[in-house]
Amino acid sequence: MGIALPDFASRLALSFGKKEKLCVGLDIGSHAVKVCELADTGKGYRLLSLGSARLPEGAVEDGALQDPEAVGTVIAALLKNLKIKEKKVGISISGYSVIVKKINLSVMSQEAMANHIQAEAEQYIPFDIEDVYLDFQNLNTNHQDEERTDVMLVAAKKEVVDGYLGMLRSLGLKPVLVDVDAFALENAYAANFGLGENVALIDIGASKMNINIISGGSSVFARDVVLGSRQLTEQIQSRFGVEPEEAEELKIGIVSAGERKEQLTEILIGTCSQWVGEIRKALDFYYTNHPEEPLVKLVLSGGGARIRGLDQVLANELELPVEIFNPFSKMQIDQARMDADYLAYMAPEMTLAAGLASRPAEL
C-alpha cells in the first residue's frame, strides 16, 4: 500500500457487473473495534461476517492509538473468533489528526492540481506539511465554461496513520486502505441507496460524531465533533449512582426506566442539546450555500443511534425526518448463519465498518 490516503473518488460504491475482491472493514473506535466482511456478487453485496469487541479504557483516544498492543490483541482475537482469513484490511481515521477541507481552485488537469496542492498546501492545512499525508478529490462542480471547481482536500498526520499501519502489520494483516470516518459513512450509504438524494449523514460514536452532508451526488460538508454517547452514559451514572453497564442499558432501553423515566428524559434532552447545536450549525452552513437544494432527511447511525428517543428528539429539534440507518438493508444475508435479532441490534454501530468493507482490496 502506498501510504498516502487513497483516491476518495473510488469510495463511492463499486461498479457492479464484475466481481471484485473486497477488503475487510475495521472500524477502530474509542470504545470498541467493529469488523465487517462483505462479498461482491456482481449484482450487489453479500454480508459474510460481522462482530464487535470492547477495547480497554484509554486504548484509543481522539482517534490515536495509545496502547497499540492492547488494540492489536483485541483485533486478532475478534478476527479469529469470526474465522476471517482475508488479510487485506481497510481502516478509517478521525479526530485532531485529520483535516478535511473543501477548497475552490482553477480548473486544471489532475497532475497539475496535485502539484499545485502539494506546493500550496500550507495555506490550507494548519500542520507542518512534512508531517502529514495529503490527498484530494476534484468534485468537478464546474459547469460548462466555468473556470473554477471545488476540491475536497484531506490531510492526516503521519504519526497517527503510521501507528495504525504498524500495529496492523504486526498482526500479519495488510492494510490497503486508509479512509476518513465521514467518507466511510458516505460509502456505506452509497452502497445501499446511491447518492441521488440530498441527506445529512450523522454517525454518533462513543466519543465523537461524524457529520457528512450529501448534495448533488457528492459530499459538500464533512467534519468531526468531539461529542459522543459516552457523555450520556456518564450523566446517567452520575445521576443514579449506577455502574457503566447499567447506565448503558438504561440509555438504550434494555432496562426499564420505571420511576426514573422523567429524569432520564431530562438527561437525554440536556445532553443531546449539544449534539443538536452542532448538527444545526452544519445544516445552517449548508442552507446558506445551497438555499435551493433542501435536505430530504437526516440519516442516523453509530452506537448512539440506539439511544431510545434520540431520533424523535432530533426530528423535533431540527425539523427533518430522521431515519436510523441499517447498512445491510439492501444486502444479501445468509439467514441460516446470521441471527436476525443480533444483526438488527448491531447494524447502526457497524456503519463505518460496512463502508470500509465495500471497498476493493486492490486499489
Image (cartoon, helix red, strand yellow):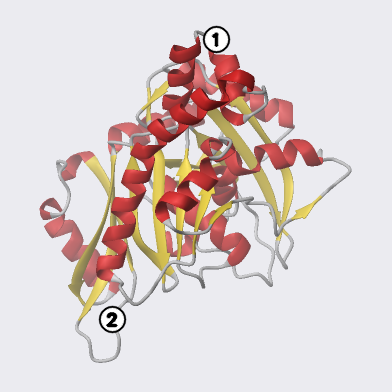
Q: Where is residue 8 shown, x and y percent of the image?
A: 41, 59
Q: Secondary structure at mark 2?
A: loop
Identify the disc placed on residue 243: 1
Q: Using the image, determine if residue 168 lies above or below residue 243.
A: below
Mark 2 lies on residue: 142
Q: Using the image, determine if residue 179 lies above or below residue 261.
A: below
Q: Using the image, determine if residue 299 lies above or below residue 3.
A: below
Q: Where is residue 278 shown, x and y percent of the image?
A: 32, 45
Q: Using the image, determine if residue 28 lies above or below residue 117.
A: above
Task: Please indicate whether residue 1 sits to the left or right of residue 40 in the image.
Answer: left
Residue type at numbered disc 2: Asn
The residue at 80%/41% (across/down) is 340
Q: Is residue 6 visible?
A: no
Q: Where is residue 272 shown, x and y percent of the image?
A: 41, 36
Q: Where is residue 57 shown, x and y percent of the image?
A: 46, 15
- The local crowd at label 2, few if under 14, some if 14 to 19, many if 20 or more residues have their Cα within 10 Å, is few
**Could you give the CA–CA distance between mark 2 and mark 1, rounded to whole angstroms?**
55 Å
Q: Nearer the viewer, residue 202 or 174?
A: 202
Q: Is residue 207 visible?
A: yes
Task: Please indicate whether residue 36 sits to the left or right of residue 163 in the image.
Answer: right
